[in-house]
Image (cartoon, grey):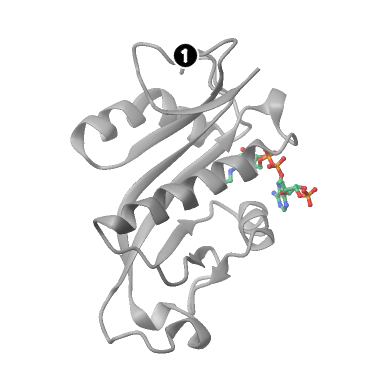
Amino acid sequence: MALLFAPLDTRLHQRTTFRCGVPALDAYLQQQAGQHQRDGIATTHVLTDDSDPARILGYCSLAAAQLQLHDLQAADRRRLPAYPVPAVRLGRLAVATGVQGKGYGRLLLGHAMNCSVALRGQLSVRVLVVDALDERAAAFYRLHGFHETSDQAHTLYLPLGQA
Ligand SMILES: CC(C)(COP(=O)(O)OP(=O)(O)OC[C@H]1O[C@@H](n2cnc3c(N)ncnc32)[C@H](O)[C@@H]1OP(=O)(O)O)[C@@H](O)C(=O)NCCC(=O)NCCS
């Protein structure tokens, strides 16, 4: 068994059977993710196991974004110029109900961070930002080092540090 990350392939990956416990996140994968990928709105990355590569264990979607400098906490603003802060938006992240609690959510988060940092050879990215669906989701991101923006408890960001 080897876990793999791949861009969503609507001809290969089985989207209709995916359930994570939040219907809006299931519906996004089933109805919008492919179109958003084709339109250049958000790229969906799926986590699969090579023994059953069509089965989606979890997914996350990434898109370019920005935060305003004042959205960052004072300590994270230090030495930054008075420009919008380049960001990657982690639009959605979900793990299938049958495999939750096995570390896949953390793995997807690590993948999103790695993708963001890897972009830096060509395009600067300072933070990974997420709009948490609710307090439970926000708790997951806080546990993994995300900071709250100055005015919205459910918009959180992870400073990616200097290159
Ligand atoms: C939230 C979710 C992504 C977590 O994925 P997961 O694979 O079950 O989580 P992991 O096994 O990777 O857990 C990693 C750590 O986060 C913790 N954790 C998991 N869900 C958590 C939550 N909602 N709040 C706080 N901590 C949480 C785990 O206890 C674990 O910590 P530990 O290693 O100290 O025990 C998953 O449960 C899910 O898809 N839920 C439904 C959709 C959702 O709420 N998405 C949130 C993003 S909008």
x, y percent for residue 109:
55, 47
x, y percent for residue 136:
67, 53
Left or right: 107 in relation to 36:
right
Q: Residues within 10 Å of mark 1 (few under 14, many from 20)?
A: some
The residue located at (69%, 60%) in the rendering is 143
Left or right: 37 in relation to 106:
left
Does the residue tagged 1 have its C-beta within 8 Å of any atom of ligand 1?
no
Residue farthest to the right, as pictured:
101
Q: How many marks?
A: 1
The residue located at (34%, 11%) in the rendering is 11
Q: Which residue is mark 1?
A: 14
| 9, above or below 72, in the image | above
| Quadrant where ligand 1 appears | top right
Helix, strand or loop under label 1 = loop
Residue farthest to the left, as pictured:
39
Left or right: 147 in relation to 77:
right
The residue located at (25%, 59%) in the rendering is 123
> Which quadrant is the C terminus positioned in?
bottom left
Identify which amino acid the numbered label 1 is placed on: Gln
x, y percent for residue 116:
40, 53
The residue located at (36%, 25%) in the rendering is 31
x, y percent for residue 139:
67, 58
| 120, above or below 105, in the image | below
Left or right: 137 in relation to 9:
right
| 138, above or below 52, in the image | below
Asked whether 133 or 101 is in front, the reply is 101
> Which quadrant is the N terminus positioned in?
top right
- Quarter residue 135 falls in: bottom right
